[in-house]
Image: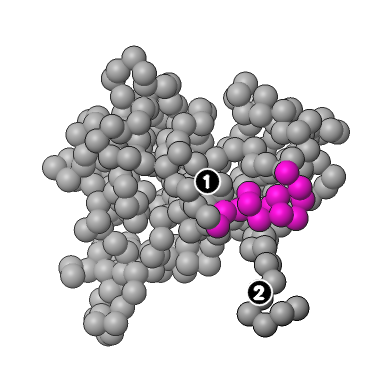
Amino acid sequence: MGPGLQVFRPMPLPPILYEDDALIAFDKPSGLAVSSDRWDRAPVNLVGALRAQYGRDAANVHRLDADASGVLLCAKTKAALDVLSGQFQSKTVDKRYLALVAVLSPERAIKAARPLRDGLAGLPTEFSVDLPLGDDEAERGRMRVSTRRDGKPGTTAFRVLESFGPLAWLECRPLTGRPHQIRVHLAAVGAPVLNDALYGDPAVRLFLSDLKRRYKGRDEERPLIGRLALHASELGVTHPVSRAPLRLAAPLPREFEIALRNLRRYAPAGFAKR
């Protein structure tokens, strides 16, 4: 090899959750784009690395926001992709996400819909959001609740797993597959995902000093979660070849585990004033 020449090495793939001749599923990290799209021509993306190793027929089966983490299912063959795409279109796939959300006061919530609250100003134990979504013409890359004819139906079911005063830990089940659906639906009811740069409240962050009284070291403190607090935890499909049920699960990111451990330990005493 001549001087100055560099050997191209494809991006390493994320941890593999499952693999066989037809499928491969990854535990995608936050910050990695799945593919280039109409909004983001990301030169480094998971599908590009996948095709470099498995060939041009390899493709992602569903969406997962770049800033979210968790289960990402890909097909190795066109036949497998066609079968799985049909399952997503017919809404027979079970998708489950976990999210830490900020339960905003009505005056801080966006005005897309009325904030949803129970009698104690928190979120109901179970609720669903059925609001159509469309592109936000005022800002490229954003979606919005749409009342126009071009709005596409969007439905998400939510369940509160734990409440921590101004924060809540939710299970989210999108029954349709619109871009940013969970994030827009939560923002619409006044409970955006923590650290959501597009739809959240930038003033709301989670620091240990918010929870632990007499905490030392605030000057150099970092938030307990510094990324979008949304994780694709489980995905259930029918295998395109064997036709057997296949359930995939991605472990909770460590920073989520640490944040939840501290919330469970200190939040009942109330959030400290910053």
Image quarter hosting the C terminus: bottom left
Q: Which mark is residue 266?
A: none
In this rendered view, identify the residue nearer to me: 238 or 19.
19
Residue 263 lies within the magenta run = no
Tag 2: residue type?
Gln
Which residue is more in the foreground, 54 or 157?
Answer: 54
Q: Position of residue 68 (x, y in %)?
A: 48, 52
Is there CB contact under 8 Å for labels 2 and 1?
no
Q: Nearer the viewer, residue 50 or 147?
A: 50
Q: Residue at x 76, y 33 (%)?
A: 78
Q: Which residues are magenta?
A: 44-56
Residue 141 seen from this side: yes
Q: Secondary structure at mark 1?
A: loop
Q: Residue at x 55, y 57 (%)?
A: 44
From this viewpoint, is residue 261 visible?
no
Q: Is residue 226 above or below residue 149?
A: below
In this view, the mark in front (2 or 1) = 2
Q: Which residue is mark 2?
A: 6
Q: Which residue is mark 1?
A: 36
Instruction: Bin the neighbour count of mark 2 within 10 Å (Cα to Cα): few under 14, some 14-19, many 20 and up.
Output: few
Q: Is residue 215 above or below residue 87?
A: below
Magenta stretch: dominant SS?
Answer: helix
User: What's the distance in space between the residues labelled 2 and 1, CA to CA?
Assistant: 25 Å
- Residue at 32% over, 64% down: 206
Residue that sits furthest to the left in the current view? 107
Residue 197 image point, x, y percent: 32, 52
Q: Quadrant of residue 268?
A: bottom left
Q: Nearer the viewer, residue 118 or 72?
A: 72
